[in-house]
Image: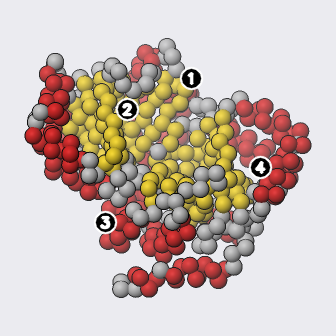
Amino acid sequence: MLYLYDSIMIVPRLQEEFWKVMGSDYLPEAEQTGLRLVGMFMIGIHYNENLALWEFDDWATLDRLQKLHDKHPWIQSWKRESVDYVTDSTGKVLQPAPFSPTLAKLKKGDYKYTIYLHTLAKVLPGKEDEYIKAVGKELVPMAKSWGMKLVGCYKAVGGTASSGEVINIWTAGNVHGDWVKIREASLKDLAYKEWEVKAGKWRPKVVYRFLYGLVPYSPLRTPFLPEAAIEEVRTVAMPEVEWK
Amino acid sequence: MLYLYETTYPFPGKMDEYVDVMGTDLMPGLARHMTVLGVFRIAFRHRESFFLSELPKGVDSLEGLSNFVIHERDGLLWHRAGLRYRDEWFDSLLEGLPFSPTAAEIKKRQKKGDFTGNSLYYRLIYNILPGKTEEFLKAFEKELLPLDEKMGKKLAGCYLWFGACGESGEIISLWSVKDWAHFGKMREAQLKDPKYQRWMQKVSGLCADWSYKFLLPTTYSLLH
């Protein structure tokens, strides 16, 4: 299993409209190539940045995706349409850790939250696997006791990326107050203090961001959107493309 | 041998048109002064393209480029036309390492099937620790290059920054692979190969880090 991590810069104020047209005009075609949307998020503290995370089975999916982007007439239309909404995007290919939940597991489990925590660790060369193993063995159970569930643990292996990039995504509650409680619990946890000292030797730097799950058709999203809203959003733009 | 390395940022939605126009309006003029090795879009990147050219040997090398940009009609026209498609671009110079194939060698090897029919290249930039460059390059040539070429990757270029551009300690390498499926297969095979594991251990002690970008060759790119 592999993941495509697409960081998208959106024209300010057009975000919700972009989510709608992406859901109606791009998502169905992308899914035809074998991509499966795991999450579409707004990034906290940098609100015109979005993250689309896709799951796919093998490397050959990327060849199909590239062909789709180069040759499919609908995608040519989508590329012209998306100019109104997207100012830039950068993608990486991620390899999941053995303990990282798949989309199927995420869909079955209780992973619908409004807030997710995204961490990007810059791990020293040659230490990635050791670090990832320790995340699974030590940090995941520890974080569970504070109220955080692991959504994904990945290392960057292709696209535009640097060596040693390890990305973790965690559930982090539904209101910021939930996050405050999680944080307080972590700060009181002696094991976490020990973990930070230990992990600091593998990864001197970690960048933290919030992800907001507000997109109705995203499997990882707030539980407060009723299921019916998914259909509503998916059909909003459909009359525009019914000429097919 | 010197190389011109240009990164360009076309406007959103203009990437395909920009690389097409480069092919018709820029390449013929540049071909008078240099051998354009590769023109690429960056994979999963909305607005970034990259091109690499080999400059002729000798003092005329940079003069030809300057003439094209400053005095020649098609060069001046391109300079204005290009502004319709891009807002930023950066040029730098690279120096080829002794084991890096030249344009003539690439053309020769294309007859044997290398550097042709690929839909994917990747550029790997190593950030070498101070004082380790010589050791790294020796290991790169003697250990990594045979391993990777045996797997089916081909080294299309390996360079140092030349003069007043780039960053100290950086080595830029450019590799061809057939496609993503091929890259995935090679990656899996390498991860199981003890020789490759030894290389990874060694390179981890010689580099602060490395970064990569995956490149999609245009239809008219010499490296394709």
- Labels 3, 1: front one: 3
**What residue appears at the point 40 percent right and 81 percent down from the top-left corner?**
A241
Q: From mark 3 to mark 2, how far is it between C-alphas?
A: 30 Å
Q: Are marks 2 and 1 on the same chain?
A: yes
- Which of the two residues, B199 or A140, is positioned nearer the viewer here? A140
Pointers 2 and 4 within a single chain: no
- The foreground one among A24 and B207 is A24
The colour scheme is: secondary structure
Spatial CA distance of label 2 from label 1 is 19 Å
Residues packed near mark 4 inside 10 Å, few (<14), some (14 to 19) or many (20 plus): some
- Secondary element under disc 2, as helix, strand or loop, is strand
Say yes or no: labels 1 and 4 on the same chain.
no
**Which residue corresponds to mark 1?**
B205
Between A35 and B12, the one lying in front of the other is B12
- Give the residue type at disc 4: Val
Label 2 CA crowd tier, 10 Å (few <14, some 14–19, many 20+):
some
Residue identified by numbered label 3? A71
Label 2: chain? B
Spatial CA distance of label 3 from label 4 is 43 Å
> What residue is shown with label 4?
A140
What SS does tag 1 mark?
helix
Q: Return the disc, 3 or 4, that comes first in the chain's sequence.
A: 3
Indicate the amino acid at tag 3. Answer: Lys
Q: Position of residue A28 (x, y in %)?
A: 47, 74
- Image quadrant holding the C terminus of chain A, namely bottom left
Residue at the disc numbered 2: B173
Amino acid carrying label 2: it is: Ser
